[in-house]
């Protein structure tokens, strides 16, 4: 099942503001944004597999990316979950 997000952004404005307010160096803020975005994507993947996020396996994550990539190739980028 391919469920499009309301927004293709995985870092909300609120998340971004919290990172901006943190007492971190620029490179640390970048890594924090990447980590929060990854968490949000992993939550989506876990929901698609109907498992808890901590139960996701590397194989499942790879398979999800392969599936999304295949959708992008076969149906176009607007049909894929990840918009890049």
Image: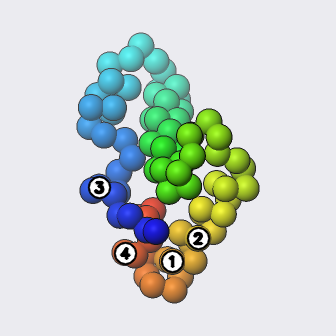
Q: Is residue 40 above or below residue 16?
A: below
Are circles 3 and 4 on residues that touch, CB within 8 Å?
Answer: no
Q: Work out which residue is located at the far top of the displayed protein and give it.
A: 23
Q: Is residue 81 left or right of residue 15?
A: right
| Disc 3 target residue | 7
Mark toward the start of the polypeptide (1 vs 4): 1
Are circles 1 and 2 on residues that touch, CB within 8 Å?
Answer: yes
Q: How much space separates mark 2 and mark 4, taking CA atoms?
A: 14 Å
- Helix, strand or loop at disc 2? helix
List x then y, in percent, for residue 71: 51, 77
Q: How much space separates mark 2 and mark 3, taking CA atoms?
A: 20 Å
Q: Work out which residue is located at the far front of the displayed protein and give it.
A: 50
Q: Is residue 49 left or right of residue 77?
A: right
Residue found 27% across the figure and 31% down from its top? 14
Labelled disc at residue 78: 4
Mark toward the start of the polypeptide (3 vs 1): 3
Labelled disc at residue 67: 2
List x then y, in percent, for residue 32: 49, 30
- Helix, strand or loop at disc 3? loop
| Disc 1 target residue | 71
| Towards the viewer: 24 or 37 | 37
Q: How much space separates mark 3 and mark 1, taking CA atoms?
A: 18 Å
Mark toward the start of the polypeptide (2 vs 3): 3
Are circles 3 and 1 on residues that touch, CB within 8 Å?
Answer: no
- Please name which of the two marks, 2 or 4, marks the residue nearer to the observer: 2
């Amino acid at each position: 099942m391919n469920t499009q997000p309301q927004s293709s952004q995985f870092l909300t404005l609120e998340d971004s503001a919290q990172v901006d307010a943190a007492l971190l160096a620029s490179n640390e803020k970048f890594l924090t944004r990447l980590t929060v975005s990854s968490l949000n994507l992993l939550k989506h993947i876990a929901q698609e597999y109907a498992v808890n996020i901590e139960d996701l396996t590397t194989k499942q994550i790879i398979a999800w990316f392969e599936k999304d990539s295949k959708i992008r190739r076969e149906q176009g980028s607007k049909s894929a979950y990840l918009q890049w």
